Image (tube, helix red, strand yellow):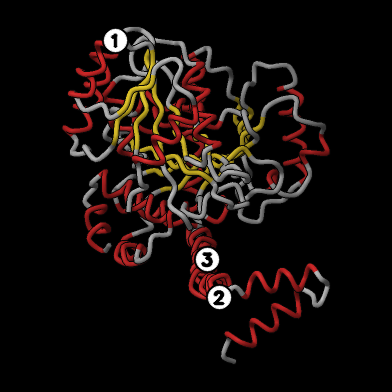
C-alpha cells in the first residue's frame, strides 16, 4: 500500500485513482499510503465550490479549469454527488460538464459519491485532497453536492470557498440566515442575466454591509452571466479566477493560511479517532450480535440509548 | 464499508439519442452501483482517460448511430494502450447479429440489444464483475 503512495507521488494516474478508490472503500492498510504521503502535503491551493442543486457548480468548475490552465497551472477536481439512502447507488453526473478536459494531461477529474456523509462532501475528500496535492496539482477544486443551508463541511478543507447563488431562491431573510451564507470567501451570482439577479445582488450586498470581517477580507460578489454567451462567460470566469487568486494571496500575506490548515487538521484527527476507536467497537458489537440485542432491548423500552452507550464505554474504554 | 462496483456510462461518437443511456444510468443507480455518466459525443480517448481517472470496473458504451464496429473496439484499444486492460468494456445499441463476433473478438465482453431486460444487464454485471481490491 505504501508502494501505491509512492507511485501516486510520481503522478501515476492509475495509482492516484486507485488510491482514492481505496480511501473511499476504506480498504485496510490504505492508511499506510496516507502516512507515506502526508509529510509532502499542503502545497496546493484548495478551492471549494458549493451552492444549491442546479446552481451551475459543474459548469463553473469546467470554465474555471480553462481559466487556470491558461496560466499553465495544473488542476485536480473532486466532484461529489449524492448516494441513494435506499440502495447505496449513485448517479455521478458532474463530469458531463467537464468532458472537454478529459484529454488534457494537466487536468485530473474524479467523481465521488457521498456514501452517507451528511456535510455535503464524501469522507474520502480529506485524504483525496492529499493525494491530488502530492501528485503535483497546483489547484484542487472540490465541488460539493447541491447543498441546502447547513452542509458546510467544505470550510474544513478549502482555502477559498465559493458560494454560488442563483436568482429566485428566496427573500432577503434567506441572505442573513446562518450556515451557507456565512462560509463564502467569494459569492458568485450565476445566471445573472435572469430576472431577479439585480435584486439578489443588492440583498447579498446589504447582508455584507451588516457584517464585520475580523480577518479583513470582505467577500466580493462576482456576477456571471449565461454560459450560452461563451465569450462573456469565459471573461467573467477569468475575473472570478483573479478574485480567487487575490483571496489566496490575502491569506498568505496575513498568515491566515495556517488557520485554514488548522481547521483541516482538526477535522482529520477527529475522523482518524473515529475510525481508530469508534468503528472497531461498533464492528465488534455488530459481529458478536450485541448490537442487535441492544436494538431489541430499546424496542421493548427495557433501557435507553444513553445507558447502553455508557455500558459500552465502561466495557471498552480503559480509564 | 462494502466495495462498490463503479461503472462509466458513455456515448461515443456523433449520436445524441441518450434515452437508453439515461434509463440504464438510473437502473444501475438503483442496483447499488456508482455510475459516472459522461453524456453524448465523447471520443474514445476521452472515455478511456475518464475510465482511468474514475478507476471504474466497467465501461458501458451506448451507440445507436451504426458506428459501433469502429468506436467500441477503439475504446478497448485506448484502454489497452494506457495499460488498463483490466477494465471490462460492454456495449449496447442497435447492433446487427453479424457484428457480435467481431466485437467479441475486439475485446467487448458483452453486448445488449433492444429487448434485453434491465435485470439481465444488472445480473451480468453482478455475476461477471467483482469490485476491485
Q: Secondary structure at mark 1?
A: loop
Residue B37 at x, y percent in the picture: 45, 28
Mark 3 residue crowding within 10 angstroms, few (<14) / some (14–19) / many (20+) = some
Q: What residue is at 66 percent from the left and 32 percent from the top?
A: A165
First-in-chain label (3 vs 2): 3
Question: Nearer the viewer's eye, disc 1 or disc 3?
Answer: 1
Pick whichever, A209 or A261, lies toward us.
A261
Expressed as whole percent of the image width and height from the top left, the position of residue A174 reads 79, 38
The answer to whether one can see residue B47 in this image is no
Vertical comparison of A217 with A26: above or below: above
> What residue does disc 1 label?
B67
- Label for residue A288? 2
Q: Which chain is home to disc 3?
A: A
Q: Is residue A214 left or right of residue A19?
A: right
Mark nearest the camera among 3 and 2 is 2
Q: Quadrant of the C terminus of chain A?
A: bottom right
**How crowded is the residue under tag 2: few (<14 C-alpha within 10 Å), some, or many (20+)?**
few
- Report the mark closest to the observer, 1 or 2: 2
Residue B1, position as x, y percentages in the image: 48, 58
Query: Relative to residue A220, is residue A304 depicted above or below?
Result: below
Amino acid at each position: 500500500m505504501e508502494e501505491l503512495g509512492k507511485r501516486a507521488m510520481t503522478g501515476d494516474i492509475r495509482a492516484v485513482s486507485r488510491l482514492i478508490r481505496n480511501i473511499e472503500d476504506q480498504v485496510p492498510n490504505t492508511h499506510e499510503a496516507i502516512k507515506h504521503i502526508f509529510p509532502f502535503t499542503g502545497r496546493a491551493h484548495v478551492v471549494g465550490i458549493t451552492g444549491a442543486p442546479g446552481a451551475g457548480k459543474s459548469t463553473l468548475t469546467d470554465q474555471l479549469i480553462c481559466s487556470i490552465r491558461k496560466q499553465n497551472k495544473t488542476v485536480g477536481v473532486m466532484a461529489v454527488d449524492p448516494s441513494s439512502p435506499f440502495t447505496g447507488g449513485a448517479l455521478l453526473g458532474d463530469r458531463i460538464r467537464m468532458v472537454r478536459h478529459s484529454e488534457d494531461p494537466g487536468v485530473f477529474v474524479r467523481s465521488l459519491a457521498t456514501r452517507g456523509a451528511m456535510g455535503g462532501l464524501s469522507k474520502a475528500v480529506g485524504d483525496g485532497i492529499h493525494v491530488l496535492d502530492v501528485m503535483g496539482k497546483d489547484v484542487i477544486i472540490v465541488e460539493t453536492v447541491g447543498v441546502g443551508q447547513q452542509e458546510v463541511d467544505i470550510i474544513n478543507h478549502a482555502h477559498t470557498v465559493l458560494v454560488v447563488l442563483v436568482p429566485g431562491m428566496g427573500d432577503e431573510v434567506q441572505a442573513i440566515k446562518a450556515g451557507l451564507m456565512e462560509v463564502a470567501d467569494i459569492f458568485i451570482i450565476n445566471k445573472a442575466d435572469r430576472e431577479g439577479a439585480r435584486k439578489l445582488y443588492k440583498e447579498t450586498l446589504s447582508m455584507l454591509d451588516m457584517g464585520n470581517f475580523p480577518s479583513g477580507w470582505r467577500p466580493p460578489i462576482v456576477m456571471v452571466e449565461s454560459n450560452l454567451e461563451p465569450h462573456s462567460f469565459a471573461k467573467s470566469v477569468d475575473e472570478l479566477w483573479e478574485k480567487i487568486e487575490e483571496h489566496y494571496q490575502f491569506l498568505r500575506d496575513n498568515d491566515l493560511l495556517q488557520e485554514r490548515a488548522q481547521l483541516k487538521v482538526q477535522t482529520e484527527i477527529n475522523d482518524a479517532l473515529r475510525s481508530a476507536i469508534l468503528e472497531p467497537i461498533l464492528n465488534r458489537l455488530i459481529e458478536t450480535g450485541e448490537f442487535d440485542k441492544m436494538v431489541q432491548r430499546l424496542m421493548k423500552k427495557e433501557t435507553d440509548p444513553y445507558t447502553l452507550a455508557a455500558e459500552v464505554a465502561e466495557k471498552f474504554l480503559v480509564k | 464499508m462494502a466495495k462498490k462496483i463503479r461503472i462509466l456510462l458513455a456515448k461515443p461518437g456523433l449520436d445524441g439519442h441518450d434515452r437508453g443511456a439515461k434509463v440504464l444510468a438510473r437502473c444501475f443507480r438503483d442496483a447499488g452501483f456508482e455510475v459516472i455518466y459522461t453524456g453524448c459525443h465523447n471520443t474514445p480517448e476521452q472515455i478511456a482517460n475518464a475510465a482511468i481517472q474514475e478507476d471504474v470496473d466497467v465501461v458501458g458504451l451506448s451507440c445507436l448511430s451504426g458506428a459501433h464496429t469502429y468506436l467500441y473496439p477503439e475504446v478497448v484499444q485506448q484502454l489497452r494502450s494506457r495499460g488498463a486492460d483490466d477494465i471490462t468494456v460492454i456495449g449496447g445499441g442497435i447492433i446487427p447479429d453479424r457484428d457480435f463476433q467481431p466485437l467479441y473478438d475486439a475485446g467487448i465482453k458483452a453486448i445488449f440489444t433492444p429487448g434485453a431486460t434491465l435485470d439481465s444487464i444488472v445480473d451480468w454485471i453482478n455475476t461477471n464483475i467483482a469490485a476491485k481490491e
